[in-house]
Image (cartoon, rainbow, N blue to C red):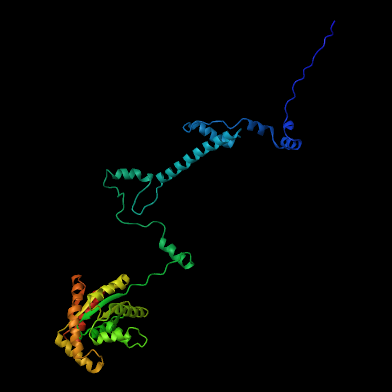
Amino acid sequence: PYARTSVLISQPRPLKMSMLLPRTVARRTATSLRPHLVSRRCLGDTTRGPDITDIPKNFKLACDFFTKDAISYGEFKQHCVSLRLFAFVGVTAGCCAALFFDPPKSSYWQRYGITFWPSNLWGLFSNKSGPLFLTEKVSHEVDVPAIVGVLIPRGQIVVPAAAPPKPKVLFVLGGPGAGKGTQCSQICENFNEWSHISAGDCLREERTNPNSKVGELINNNIKEGKIVPSEITVKLLVNAMTAQMKTGKSCFLIDGFPRSLENMNTWEKVVGDDAECLGVLFYTATEEAMEQRLLGRGATSGRVDDNIESIKKRFRTYMTETMPIVETYAKKGMVYSIDGMPAPDKVWAKTSATIKKIQG
């Protein structure tokens, strides 16, 4: 008889990580990885959270972020998404509530905020309630000027330097010998802020300057009774005003300029808004009276243009080129006409009243 034999079939040995990895790496892996971390990893990242409209489940996941450990990266990510959703809603709701209950203050809102709503609604049906809007601007609790006054001395606020004030210019026109220089001297003596700048004096001073490049040109034009090029005259006038402003003068009587429309256009082009034009102070006199005055002055002044020939040329230049300037400013209502024929004291009385009127 055959002996009974039994065959033992051994169970397959479980596959260990040490069989797949080198011995050194397997030892490090076994000691560094914890079983629960491996199990979490094995769950995968396919966990899907609730829809964004499912508020209860999203709220639960947001709470789980603080109370429960995630078992996968996908679940942890869903915790963060749900938490971010409620954080966004909370911040937005908080901002809306703050604006609703305590809106920003306005200088023209008398009553604002939800606490004033009942009285505002009552004011729609009753005349006894105060106005909702103010009729004029009011100040709030913060005294800005006082704060600025404290911070400026400390150097915490830098105040930019104020722009220098614009010079005020009053053109003084009239025929040669009408008394412009005499009245301008009186104005400067009685009004400290005024200074007299004669275009003729500036030109004469420049032509006697040995270092001047235009002195000879100026001298020839004056002898011929012609008008000096406008660019030269305007430059000399601006230089004179700049020098006078350093001494504290702010108002200027420019005597004998402009003498032509071209002079006026050049002034507006070169000076423009850098100076405030107050108008024209215009002295009138007859040609005979002006001729007698100039001849009498020429006997002692030594001026080369105080002779009969130059005087007649100056009269013609005055009538043809200077009078259109007066007419142009008269259309703008900027001409202050004064009769220069009476005695100097009477002329000064009218001149003084005119200056006070111009100053306001």
The residue sitting at 20% across, 92% down in the picture is: 296
Image location of residue 268, percent across then percent down = 28, 72
- Residue 177, by quadrant, is bottom left
Q: Residue at x 52, y 37 (%)?
A: 81
Of residues 319 and 241, the one nearer the viewer is: 319
Quarter location, residue 339 = bottom left
Taking 42 as reference, is 183 above or below it? below
Q: Quadrant of the N terminus?
A: top right
Can residue 84 be seen by looking at this rendering? yes
x, y percentage for residue 180? 23, 83
Question: In the picture provided, is 58 more to the left or to the right than 300?
Answer: right
Q: Is residue 193 visible?
A: no
Residue 146 higher or lower than 61, as above or below:
below
Seen in the image, is 129 located left or right of residue 62? left
Could you tell me which residue is drawn at 27 percent across and 84 percent down?
Answer: 200
Picture quadrant of residue 266: bottom left
- Residue at 49% x, 38% y: name it: 85
Residue 318: x percent and y percent?
A: 19, 81
Residue 190 vs residue 136, the one in the foreground: 190
Q: Nearer the viewer, residue 346 or 341?
A: 341
Q: Residue 210 placed where, x, y %? A: 36, 88
82 on left or right of 352: right
Report the label total: 0
